[in-house]
Image (tube, rainbow, N blue to C red):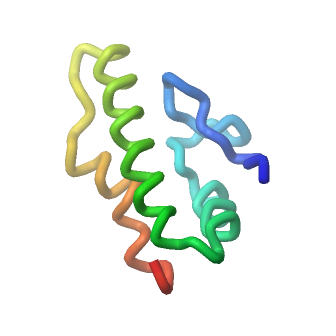
């Protein structure tokens, strides 16, 4: 399924609303897309977090804060059931 709220790389903002990706709508789309394979959602988001960290480190003089990146990409998964 194609995400409407996809990441615009290398900036890692949402293509639909220009908020930091994953925005709330992207999270809902991801949960729906991974409905039957939620464990892989965490694995895929971890890989995307690594890509985003690498991209943002190249773009800006200050690298992104690792704790903030973790919260942004993985921290919200705790509130999703069956992940």
- Say if 22 sits above or below 25 in the image: above
Q: Identify the residue at horizontal 49%, vertical 85% (top origin).
A: 81
Residue 76 left/right relative to 69: right
Please state the horizontal and vertical placement of residue 3, each as a whole percent of the image: 73, 48
Residue 19 appears in which quarter of the rendering?
Answer: top right
Please state the horizontal and vertical placement of residue 73, each as a whole percent of the image: 40, 53
Q: Identify the residue at horizontal 40%, vertical 33% (top origin).
A: 51
Residue 75 left/right relative to 20: left
Is residue 34 or residue 70 the one in the foreground?
A: 34
Location of the C terminus by quadrant is: bottom left
Q: How many marks?
A: 0
Q: Identify the residue at horizontal 32%, vertical 33% (top origin).
A: 53
- Extreme residue in the bottom direction: 81
Please state the horizontal and vertical placement of residue 35, each as a whole percent of the image: 65, 75
Residue 36 left/right relative to 82: right
Residue 13 appears in which quarter of the rendering?
Answer: top right
Residue 81 left/right relative to 26: left
- Say if 31 sits above or below 68 in the image: below
Please state the horizontal and vertical placement of residue 46, each as a whole percent of the image: 37, 51
Q: Identify the residue at horizontal 31%, vertical 46% (top origin).
A: 69
- Say if 6 sits above or below 39 in the image: above
Is residue 3 or residue 1 the one in the foreground?
A: 1
């Amino acid at each position: 399924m194609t995400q409407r709220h996809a990441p615009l790389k290398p900036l890692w903002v949402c293509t639909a609303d220009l908020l930091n990706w994953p925005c709330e709508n992207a999270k809902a789309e991801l949960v729906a897309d991974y409905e039957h394979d939620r464990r892989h959602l965490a694995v895929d988001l971890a890989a995307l977090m690594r890509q985003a960290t690498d991209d943002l480190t190249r773009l800006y003089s200050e690298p992104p804060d690792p704790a903030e990146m973790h919260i942004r990409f993985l921290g919200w998964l705790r509130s999703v059931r069956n992940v």
